[in-house]
């Protein structure tokens, strides 16, 4: 979580994101906000086997991931009976469409398993 950095500055945040990206860790939290950096390559961090690690878990029980965010929204929808919203923002080519697809993939699979 980037809010836990000893020195919170633009330089330290950029350095942390760069180090994580180099290790194919494309997701990072800033508090409850999920930041993703487009890896511009396929990573083995999606699919049914990965999805199974998230249902019923709190946001910080797994590593930062789009599925953790999807689980939070889906569980809040199911238990609070209130509409949920996920805001996906970024520049052109940043992966917004892919992020939306992964959220829908997660909810569809989790709803089938329920």
Image (cartoon, grey):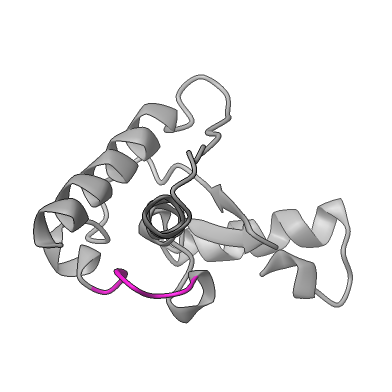
Q: Which residues are magenta?
A: 53-58
Q: Is residue 100 above or below residue 82?
A: above
Side of 81 where 12 appears, left or right? right
Q: Quadrant of the C terminus?
A: bottom left
Side of 74 where 26 appears, left or right? right
Give the overall secondary structure of the magenta segment.
loop
**Residue at figure coordinates x 20%, y 57% from the top left:** 110
40 and 69: which one is in front?
69
Given the current orientation, which residue lies at the most extreme front position? 81
Find residue 62 and report its image quarter.
bottom left
Given the current orientation, which residue lies at the most extreme top position? 92
Find residue 45 and report its image quarter.
bottom left
Q: Is residue 42 above or below residue 9?
A: above
**Residue at figure coordinates x 88%, y 58% from the top left:** 9
Side of 11 where 45 appears, left or right? left
Side of 51 where 14 appears, left or right? right
Assess whether residue 114 is covered by the magenta stretch: no
5 and 41: which one is in front?
5
Q: Quadrant of the N terminus?
A: bottom right
Residue 23 image position (x, y, % from top left): 45, 67
80 and 56: which one is in front?
80
**Residue at figure coordinates x 26%, y 48% from the top left:** 107
Residue 108 image position (x, y, % from top left): 18, 45
Q: Is residue 85 above or below residue 106?
A: above
**Residue at figure coordinates x 51%, y 37% from the top left:** 85
42 and 60: which one is in front?
60
Q: Is residue 8 above or below residue 101?
A: below
Residue 26 image position (x, y, % from top left): 47, 56
């Amino acid at each position: 979580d980037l809010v836990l950095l000893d020195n919170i500055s633009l330089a330290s945040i950029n350095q942390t994101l760069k180090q994580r990206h180099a290790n194919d860790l494309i997701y990072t939290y800033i508090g409850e906000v999920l930041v993703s950096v487009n890896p511009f390559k396929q990573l083995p961090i999606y699919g049914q086997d990965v999805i199974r690690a998230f249902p019923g878990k709190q946001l910080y029980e797994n590593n930062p991931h789009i599925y953790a965010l999807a689980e939070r929204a889906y569980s809040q929808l199911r238990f609070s009976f209130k509409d949920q919203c996920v805001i996906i923002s970024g520049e052109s080519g940043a992966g917004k469409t892919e992020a939306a697809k992964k959220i829908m993939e997660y909810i569809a699979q989790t709803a089938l398993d329920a």
